[in-house]
Each structure stands twice: as structure tokens, then as C-alpha cells.
Image (cartoon, coloured by chain):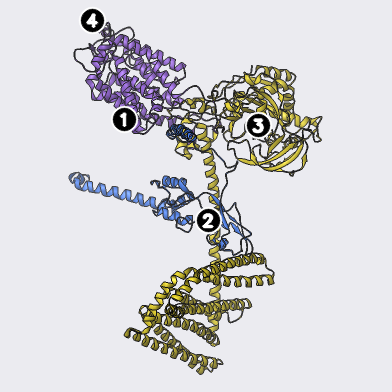
Chain colours: A yellow, B blue, C purple
Amino acid sequence: MRKIWDIHGGVHPPENKTQSLQRGIENAGIPPVLVHPLSQHIGAPAAPIVEVGQRVLKGQMIAEAKGFVSVPVHAASSGTVSAIEHREIPHPSGLLAPCIVIDTDGKDEWIELDPVDDYTTLEKADLLHRIRDCGIAGMGGAGFPSAVKLSTRDDAVIDTLIINGTECEPYITADDMLMRERADQIIAGIKILQYLIQPTEQTLIGVEDNKPEGIAALRQAAEDSNIEIVVFPTKYPSGGEKQLIQILTGREVPSGGLPADVGIVCQNIGTTVAIHRAVQFGEPLISRITTVTGDACSAPGNFEVLLGTPVDYLLKLGGFNQAQCLRLVMGGPMMGFTLKDTSVPVVKTTNCLLAPTTEELPPPPPAQACIRCGLCAEACPVSLLPQQMYWFARGKEYEKLEDHNLFDCIECGACSYACPSNIPLVQYYRASKAEIRKQQQEKVKSEHAKARFEARQLRIEREEAEKEARRKARQEAAKKKAAAGKDPIKAAQEKAAAPAVDPAQAAIEKAMAKRSGAAPEESSEETLARLQKAVETAEKRLESASAKLKEAEAADAPNLGALQTAHERMTEKLAKAKEELQQHQQASSGASDTDDPAAAAIARAQAARASKEDKSPLEKAQEQVASLEKRLTKSEQKLAEAKESGSDTAEVLEQSTAKLREKLDSARAELAQISESEAPVAAAASTNDPAQLAIEKAMAAREAAAKLSPEDKARKALESLEARVEKTRAKLAEAEESGADTVEVLRDTLAKLEDKLAEARKDPGVEG
Amino acid sequence: MIELLSQHPFIAAFGALALLGLAFGSLLGFAAVKFKTEGDPIADQVEALLPQTQCGQCGYPGCRPYAEAIAQGDAINKCPPGGETTINALADLLDVEALPLDAEEESVPSVAYIREDECIGCTKCIQACPVDAIVGAAKHMHTVVASECTGCDLCVEPCPVDCIDMIPLPTTVQNWSWELPPSAEEAITEDLIATDRGDSGEDSKDRDQAA
Amino acid sequence: MALLTVSSPHAHGPMSTATVMRLVLLSTLPGVFALTYFFGFGTLSNILLASLLALGMEALILKIRKRPIGFYLNDCSALVTAVLLGIALPPASPWWILAVGILFAIVFAKHLYGGMGYNPFNPAMVGYVVLLISFPVQMTSWVAPIGTFNGEVLGPIDALMRTFSFSGVDAVTMATPLDVLKQNNSLLVEDLWASNSQFGTLAGVGWEWANIGFLLGGLYLLYRRVFTWHAPISMLLSLTLLSALFYDGGSSASGGSPLFHLFSGATMLGAFFIVTDPVTSAVSNKGRIIYGACIGILVYLIRVWGNYPDAIAFSVLLMNFAAPLLDHYTQPRTYGHKKKNLQKEAD
């Protein structure tokens, strides 16, 4: 008798295995529809390689592995692919995931298989490739791709191969039945694994002592081999990979490590059969043995079921009565998860469907307070302190949780099982683990974002610095040129500046004058100040112009003529400005002196406006139409341009133009409507009182003059200013490109223009 | 000397205190020089806790400036992307009280999406993106590199044609996880009340049917 | 019908908090029976009144705290506190003693800390110590056990009468054996034993049987795996060791024999019903061993050299303080880890 180690903790839940052991493995048959989720294993989901409508044969690969840790998916029976879509999959979340749906044709027609008579002639790599291509993933519960697990590093010495036939979860008997009925296949599979792994010391099959028949069958089948069947006392969770390794060898898999780190490879007993069939017959993994049990099933038993078979189809075979069943569990009562829907398919890891009655597994009662009884710590197979971790999980003290080795928790559920206060401890650990992982991911992501942000900041700074350097260089160059002495540039500058400034200024002044006429009490002082300022600046400019003129005369420069004209113009401007100032002064004094008709007109205008408020919808509509028209013409222009240049944006523009047009149409319709409804009112008003009508007319005229025009004019001035700025910019760009001498001049001009523009923009804003 | 000291305890005490002061003073001075830290370690630590979305919802132009402001004593509850987790972490770090978030709600993790057929290629969003997660050129359609997007929202405002949507990240089988169960007390109260409610609910249903 | 979505495991063990508490209550029966036989119905009247008071106060405070009353009363934890306090108090204590004790146990020691599971100190022991300090006279006068005086022990009616302070009932009180031993500084233990009627075979008359009763109850709980052996056994062991060390061959300075200590006072009650209180004790097995051992040591120290004849309450409360520290330093080694958690932190 070989030595057997004990694991810490563990619990002894009622086994409930006999119900499903009453009859042998039955074939579940071919369901009308097979649903193959693309992700039935740990790792990257497989990628579909069939199309909707395509006929597939039994065993045909319908989705290929993507990446190293991945396995393909095969059609479990012949039929037609009816959909590749998101369906509910067996997952605790009850969420949807991509699936390939096959409508079976009942012919169960196999694809041509590629059996191997003597696998010892194959290279290891070929054998692994075969196992992977047959879609084999661990069938014990986790679904880790077997080929990955079996491809140990070359330098790793594996002394022990362990086959897990423990099946420690209550209710489940799939492996037990497999041992009883297919022991020879198990042994054949193990031999393939032995060839692959070459364990230097021993090959062990670990089985709990509650399966005497299975053990006997295995012993018989393994008689002439070097495979040892090790039987040990039943205790949950001996079937955990790490726990089984400890029981059989006394070794512990290091935290975060793999069994290979201690010279062990572990495989589930069902997986060995799948590997045997894959190698010997070339059959991919398209069926498995699933236990259907629980008191809500009248005919519990084990079924050889095609992967992808909907759960409700299988449950029907087990005599499932939904009325008795409050929760449906896929897997065992300790680690299985509840299904939200019975339409989900059986997948590679589905070892059991448990349909308990409410009496059998009553819904969890409300959790009570933890009394720190320590029963959970007693039960924990990895010697954690579940009660401490529970407090930390509740307090979201994730660091402490990690210090208490939360990630060594195998979520076996022994602690929750033992807890007298019914605390769902495992759920706490799952949620905390997920949260910690999420935080780690976020941390990585935020660090990445920070790096990118900083890189961007650096780039922007560098660009700024470069721009600044270039600008400085150019300024230097310009200065040098200026120092070299010739004034033509400056003259040009003056020329450019003077006209650029004046119309805008004038327009603004005019607008302000008008406005001051309309509302002298508000802005006359300001206007006065402004005008005075204008006069001053004009004077200054004139001065400098005359100074320059003199200089030029002295130097006998070629631009003398130009300067002279400039000077003349300046004088003119000054005169004008002075005149304006005088006018304004007179007007304002006049306005303040006499209670003149202007005031009356204003009063009238205001009254008119008040009355016009009734009409505002009409006005609004009109305005809208006007602005829309403007936009439309603009966009049409752009469109034309774009079309000419064959730009990509033409289409977009076209769309937007069309949209605009639509809007315009609707606005026009609205306008028509409004004016119609307004007309009778107006007519009524006019018939009632012709005088009123006259007043209105007058007021409208007045308003047009008093209210709109100054602003409009200012706007126009602004627009022209803008246009000029644009033009200057364009010229500047050109000059820059061609490296012309005028760059500096243009640049300064532009700067000035922009200043003016800004001022002009500000003014109407302030005044209006 | 000793005699002098023993005869004048005042001098002795004074001298002892002066010596002590000198000794500790020099010790402190030495420590200040020897263990001088470069930069602002608090700001660095704070920054490490911020989510680095660079969204500016805190009122600072990025996470670093906000971290520095926190180090200077600004409130720790101005980061909607970080939410309660970040506030708690900051409260832990700075040993201050965790405040409720200074915003209507925690921002849901999301990713920007450009409706590409509506994009006019103005590059405004590209300029706004703090992490260069939008690619595209002038007059060409732009697109968001979803893996780089921090969901900061900054590109939505500048878009002249409003073609950028913030799409909350969906829950998939991959990122789904169990929720923390309600605490024992909550669970009990909830359950009991829930059953009460269930009963009354049925009652009312019955009544409805009767009516 | 919608299917339920719950996290695994779906199966649940047979143990529930209420079951645990009921088992504890059940296991006090042999001890209580012995006490009643030897000291009269005083203990039962204590338990009765204490239970009523505890349930009432628990209900009241649950109502104030807006918690579901029935749900919490059902866990029987208040009842356990009341029974333990009732046993610990001198038989047929006056009602106001019981009321004050229960008030401090249930309201102050338990609910002010957040209720069941959150209390750092054993509620019954808090109540006991408050009474012991506040009313030393009433708390140190035990009725004499049967056979040590001429007359009957308190009957049920007498006990209740005394509890409610009706005049006319006066029980014979007598110093407890622990007290007698403590006061002794001239006689050899043997002589002391012979000259005082309250000493029996192992320890005091009645006391030895009460202790045996609680030992039996404790063993039953151990068998039912309500708690682990670690704390009670290590407490008894350390007490035995210390008393053996200082037995001194029974001289006048002797602290008393190991047997005497094991079966005197509240030793067994403490070992199996107080020290094992899960809420306030250490949780790791190693922690529990240290916790129990320290209590044993403290009990002996206070009994022999302290001011009080018995010391379970003080020792337990003192060690309640230390329980979190013990837990911190006695974390078990997790599977797959080379070192203990704490050492890992230090690295």
C-alpha cells in the first residue's frame, strides 16, 4: 500500500451519487438543433470557418483555434449551419456569446477521419497537434486546452503522470460510469499520455474510495501496465488538481505555478478517453458523458451526449420536471453554476446537469453575521482564513486580501458549505478577485494613458519651441534687412496698414455715430472718446508719416512718391476724423439741449418694437429662411469647389447641402404658414386704423435705419476686414513658400489687421 | 567645572538643554540634507492613484495638475472617472475623510466612437484628444483607436457636426463578474422586506384581479 | 418559473448559527443540573430571569436599531449569554443584579459594538465583571452546598422569592473553596481540607460535580464539532501545569493541587463555554492554542496571587484584547506557499 497524504480541511457533503448510477451510459441521440459556442475552453475563442447555409458533416471543424491557448470547435452531427450569432451560453452570467448553430439532418454523416494505427510512429509535436486539432480541452470542469497542458518545456522533468478520477463533487457520476464501462479506453488514453510525457517515475490514477466498481474495472484494465490505481478516502475537494497532487505525492504546487513545476502533469480521466479516440480513431471531441440528476429528474442517469445539445433536450431524457425545480445547476452542487435558461447547450466542460428540488437544495437563507467560528478555516483545503478574508472583502481592503492569499483560493465552496451563518463566502471572493483584476488592468491602462499623455505634451511643447525658434529667426532676418537700410518695406507696411485700419475704423465710427444718434444718452461720451482717440492716432500717424517722408526726402529714396501719397492721405484722414469729432460734439450738445424730434422718434420706434413683438414668429421665420439661404449658397459653392477638385468631401458636402435644402424648404413652408395667419390680423389692423398703419410703416423704416443699419454696417466692415485678413494670410503663406522678401512685412501687416479685427469684433459686441 | 555645575543647577539645566537642542537640531538638519526627496512625492503618489483619463472634469488640465492640487490641499472628490474607489484610495493615502463624489454621478467607463460617415474631417477632435487616440487627417474621416481611448469625453464638445458618441463599455462574458453580495444586515433586511413586499404584491395583485 | 441565479456552492452543511447556539444551551444541562442539586434552585432562577431579561432587552434594542427582531432572536445568542451569566452569578442573585448584568452584557458589550459577531468582548463576561466590581458583596456570597450545613438548599419558590428580594428567605452562604484556600496562610492543604466542610473529594463539595457536568457538556460539543479542541484543552493544560508547578507539596503557601484547580470555580464552564466563544477568541488553531494557554496562566495567577478568588472572567476579557494580535501572528501557511504570510510580509 502506498503512502497517501491528507489535505487540510475539506468537507463531507452527502454524496447523492447512487441516483444516477442505476443504469448504464445511454446515448442521448441527435437533437434537432446543435448550438456550438465558440468559447468552450479557457483562452481565446475559436474563429468560425463555416458560413451560414453551409452543409457540415459530423466531426467537421467549424471554428479554428485562434492563438496558442485555444482549441477548435467541431460539428457534432451532420446538418446545415443555420446561424452564426450571439446566443445564451452556459456561463454564470447568463450572457450571450457567439455560437454556431447547426440544424441537424439526422443522417449523422461522418467526415473522413484520419486514424493512426501506431501513435508511437508519430513525433511528439505531431501528436500534440492532433490533440489540439481534435478540439480537446480539459473535461473535468475548467476546460484548459489539453495540448497546452501536455506540451511541457523540454527542460522540465516530469516524474509523475496523474490521472484524475476523483470526481469528488456530490451527485456527479460521469467519470464513475466511464471507469465502469470504458476502463480499457481510459488505459489506452493514459498510454498515449505516457508516450507523450514520458514520466520518469510513475503513472497514477487517483480515485476516491466511494467508486469500488469503477476501481475494480480500472484495476482489471490496467493489469499488465505500469499504471497504478491509488484509492483514498472520500473527502471534498480531493478532486481539485492541486489537492489530488498533494494527496498522491505530498507535493504542493507552488502558488501561481503549475504542476509541471513540481514534476507532475495531471489530466482528467474523461480527457484521456477523448485523447485516445482522437489519436486512435481521429475522432474530434464532439460528445461527452454528462450526468443528469437531482430530485426534479424522474429518470436520472448518465448520457453520452453530443456537444451542442440544448440542455432542455437532455433534461427531457432525464425526466425533468421544471415545476419542482427552482434552480438548475450545470456542474456539481459545490462548484457548478446556475443556468438562467434551459436553451443553453452542453459544452466540453458540462459534466453534470443538476436539477434539485427546493427541498433538496433549498434557496440560500439570508446570511447572518459572521461569528468567527472558524469552521470555514477548518474546511479550507488551502489553509486560508476565510473569515478574515470575508471581513476584508466586505471592507474592500484589497491589499489585505492579497496578503491573505486570496488568489490561492480555488473557490471550492467548502467554506460556504460549512458556514453556520450562511454567508456566501465564495461569492465575496469571486467578486473581490474580479475587482482586484479589474483594478490591475485599470492601473496598467492608466499608466499607458499617462505615458501617451506625457508624450503628447512633450510633442506639443517641442512643436511650439520649434515654431518660436523659426519665428525668431525670421524676425532677426527681417531686422537685419531693415537695418540694411531701405525703407520700401516700411512704406509698404504703412500703406498696407493705413487702408486696412481706416475703413474698419470708419465703419465702426459711423456705426457708432448712428447708434449714438439713436441712443445718445448712452454712448455719446464713449463715442466722443473714441473719436478723439481716432483723431489722435491719425495725428500720430501723420506725424510719423511726415517724419518718414522727410527722411526719405533726405535720403532721396526711390519710394518718395509713395510716401508722399501716404502722407497726403493721412492728412486727409486726420481732417475727416476731426470733422467727425466736431460733428459729434455738436450733435451731442444739441441732443442734450433740445427735446428734439429724435427723442420722439425713438419713443415711437420703441412702441413699434413692442407692437412688433406680436409678429416675432414671422420675423423669426424670415430670419431663419434668410440665414438658411445664405448657408445653402455657401455650401453649394463649397460643393462646386469640391467637385471641381474632385475631393473626397464632395459627397459629405452634397449630403449636407441636401439637408440644408430640406431645412430651407421646411422653413419656407413655415414662413408661408405664419405669414398667412398673420395677414388677416394685419389687414384687420390696417382697416381699423390707417393712422396706425402709417405709424407702423414709419416705425419700421425708422427701425431699419436706427436699429439694423449700424450693426449691419459694422458687420459688413468686419466681414471685409476678415476677408482682407484671409487674403493677407494667403499672401503670407505664398510668400513664405516662395521665400519672398515681403514675408516680414506681410506678417506684420497681418498682425495689425488681426488686432484691428479683434477690436472691431469687440466693439459691436460691447455697443450692441 | 563639575563643581560649578553642581553649585549652579540653573546653569547645568540650561547647558543640558542647550546641548540637547544642538544635538537634535544638527540631527534634524543632517536628516533634512541626507534624506532630501526630489520633487513632490505626495503628488506622485496621488497621481499614481488617479485614473489618468486626462479628462479635466476636476477643473484641472489633466491628472498631474490635479494631483499637485490635491497635494496642496484641494478636495479629493473631483474625479468622476475614478469614482468612489479613487476617492477611498486617496483618502487612505492622505489620511483624510473620504468625501462623496463632487459630481452628479460616477462616469461610466466608456469609449468614444466616431460615426464615420458623418465626420467631416475637421481634425478638431484629434487636437482635443489628450492621449492621441484619434487618427485621421484634415478632410479625411477620423476614427478612434478604442484600445487607447480613456473615455474622457473631451473630443465630443469640439466636434462641429456632433458625430462622436460616448459608448459605455458593454458587459461581456469576458469582463462579467459576480457582484459583492449585500452585507449580512442588508441581506437580512432586504430579504425580509422583500418577502413582505412579495406577499403584499400578491395581495395587491389578487385585489386587482378581484377588482 | 424563473430559475434562480446564485453563486456556488449550492449545497449547504447542516450547521447553522442557531443550531450551534442550541447545542451550547443543551450542553450546559449536566452542569446546571449539578449546580441545582448541590446549591438549590438559585441557579435556575438566575437563568430564568436572565433569559427573560436578555430576550426583552435584545428585542428592544433590535427594535431601536431597526433590525428584524424575530430573525435575530431566533439565533439564540442572547439566550446563550443569559444562561452563561445566570450560571456564573451566585445562585438566586437579586433581580437587580441580573438586570444590571444583562444590561451590560446585551446592550453595552454586544449591541453597542454592532450586535452579534461584532463584539470584541464576551458579553456574559463583561456583564459578570461589571457586577463583580460594582457589587462585590453580593457577588462573592455563594450559597452553601447541600451537606455542608443543617438544612435544605433553596427550593424553586424560595429561590424566586430571594431573587425578587422578598424578605423571609435567607439562604446559608459560605466561602467558596477557592476563597478558603486563598485566605489560608497557616494550614497545610491537607489540614485545611479536613477542617473545612466545603471541601469534597476532588475540590469543593458541589463544585467538583458542577465542573464535571460542564466537562461532559463540553466534550459533547467537541464531539459535535461545534468548536475545536485547541483553546479549551490548552487552557486546561496550562492551568494544570502551573498548579502542578506551584503545588508545593501541599504546604501552607501552596496554590492548590492541579485537580483542585481543574474542578474548582468556573474552570470547566470557562474552558468549554466561555473560552470557546468564537466571536471573541482567536480564530486560527495556533492562535487558539496560545489564547487558551494564556487564559489558563492568567486564571492561575489571579486565583493564587490576585485579589479575586476566581478569575475566568478577567482572564477571558484580557485575552479578548489580544485575540486580533494573535490572529495576525498566527496565520496558517497557505497551500503552495513556502513561508507563512507574516514572514512573507517581512521579506
Distance Cα–Cα, label 3 vs label 4 = 81 Å
Disc 1 to disc 2: CB gap under 8 Å: no
Q: Secondary structure at mark 1?
A: helix
Residue behind mark 2:
B153
| Residue A458 image position (x, y, % from top left) | 54, 61
Residue behind mark 1:
C108
- Tell me the tag on residue A278: none
Q: Secondary structure at mark 3?
A: helix
Three-letter amino acid code of the residue under disc 4: Asn
Of tags 3 and 1, the one toward the viewer is 3
Residue behind mark 4:
C150
Side (left or right) of C255 relative to A650: left
Of tags 3 and 4, the one toward the viewer is 3
Of tags 2 and 3, the one toward the viewer is 3
Q: Nearer the viewer, residue A556 or B210?
A: B210
Q: Chain of mark 2?
A: B
Residue behind mark 3:
A311
Three-letter amino acid code of the residue under disc 3: Val
Q: Nearer the viewer, residue C85 or A381?
A: C85
- Residue C279: in sight, yes or no? no
Distance Cα–Cα, label 3 vs label 1 = 55 Å
Q: Nearer the viewer, residue A419 or A679?
A: A679
Distance Cα–Cα, label 1 vs label 4 = 42 Å
Of tags 1 and 4, the one toward the viewer is 1
Label 2 packing within 10 angstroms: few (<14), some (14-19), many (20+): many
Q: Secondary structure at mark 2?
A: loop
Three-letter amino acid code of the residue under disc 1: Phe
Image: C102 above or below A495:
above
Q: Chain of mark 1?
A: C
Disc 3 to disc 1: CB gap under 8 Å: no
